[in-house]
Each structure stands twice: as structure tokens, then as C-alpha cells.
Image (spheres, rainbow, N blue to C red):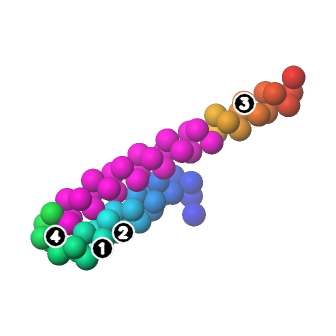
């Protein structure tokens, strides 16, 4: 799986989880979809942020190893 698809898949997974949770509480369907879409967007952004943090930590570690 290409690395560029990872944020999309993680965002979709988070959105699906939130939709199913909100449906358990008998929230109207349109509201569940809105909450799921917002959660998917947050999951997508969080995945990108975590990847950037992981890359920066990796670079810092390599710089320390070289010194």
C-alpha cells in the first residue's frame, strides 16, 4: 500500500467508528454522518501530523548518531 493512502484509510476508519457509535445512541442519521465526516477529517489531519512528527524524530536521532 502506498504511503500516501495511509491518512485516507485512517481517516475513513475513524469516521466509520464514529458513525457506528453515534447510531448506537439513536442520533438521527444525518447528524451521525456529519459527526462521522468531521471525525474522518480529524483522523486524516492527525495521521499526517503523526507521520511528520515521526519523521522529525527520526531525523533528530540520525543527527545525534552522526555527532
Residue 45 pos. (x, y %)? 41, 46
Q: Return the disc, 1 or 3, that comes first in the chain's sequence.
A: 1
The main secondary structure of the magenta stretch is helix
Q: Residue 23: percent from the left, percent from the top?
A: 23, 74
Specify few, some or many for label 3: CA neighbours under 10 Å numbering under 14, 14-19, or 20 or more. few
Under circle 3, the secondary element is helix
> Could you say which is closer to the camera, residue 26 or residue 3?
26
Q: What residue sits right under mark 2 in the picture?
A: 17
Is 63 covered by the magenta stretch? no
Asked if the residue under mark 2 is in contact with the one under mark 1, i.e. CB atoms within 8 Å, the reply is: yes
Query: Circle 4 — which element?
Result: loop
Label 2 element class: helix
Is disc 4 surrounded by few (<14), some (14 to 19) or many (20+) residues within 10 Å? Answer: few
- Whether 58 is drawn above or below 23: the answer is above
Contact (CB < 8 A) between labels 1 and 3? Answer: no
Measure the C-alpha gap from mark 4 to mark 3.
46 Å
Residue 38's x, y, as percent? 27, 53
Whether residue 44 appears in magenta in the rendering, the answer is yes
Give the residues in magenta: 32-54
Mark 3 lies on residue: 60
Residue 34 appears left or right of 15 = left
Residue that badge 4 annotates = 27
Which marked residue is nearer to the observer: mark 1 or mark 3?
1
Residue 10 in which image quadrant: bottom left
Between marks 3 and 2, how big is the CA–CA gap? 35 Å
* Residue placed under numbered mark 1 in the picture: 20
Classify residue 57 as left or right of residue 27: right
Image quarter hosting the C terminus: top right
Amino acid at each position: 500500500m502506498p504511503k500516501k493512502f495511509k491518512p485516507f484509510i485512517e481517516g475513513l476508519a475513524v469516521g466509520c467508528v464514529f458513525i457506528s457509535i453515534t447510531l448506537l445512541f439513536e442520533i438521527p442519521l444525518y447528524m451521525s454522518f456529519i459527526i462521522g465526516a468531521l471525525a474522518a477529517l480529524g483522523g486524516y489531519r492527525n495521521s499526517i501530523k503523526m507521520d511528520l512528527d515521526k519523521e522529525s524524530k527520526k531525523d533528530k536521532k540520525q543527527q545525534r548518531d552522526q555527532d
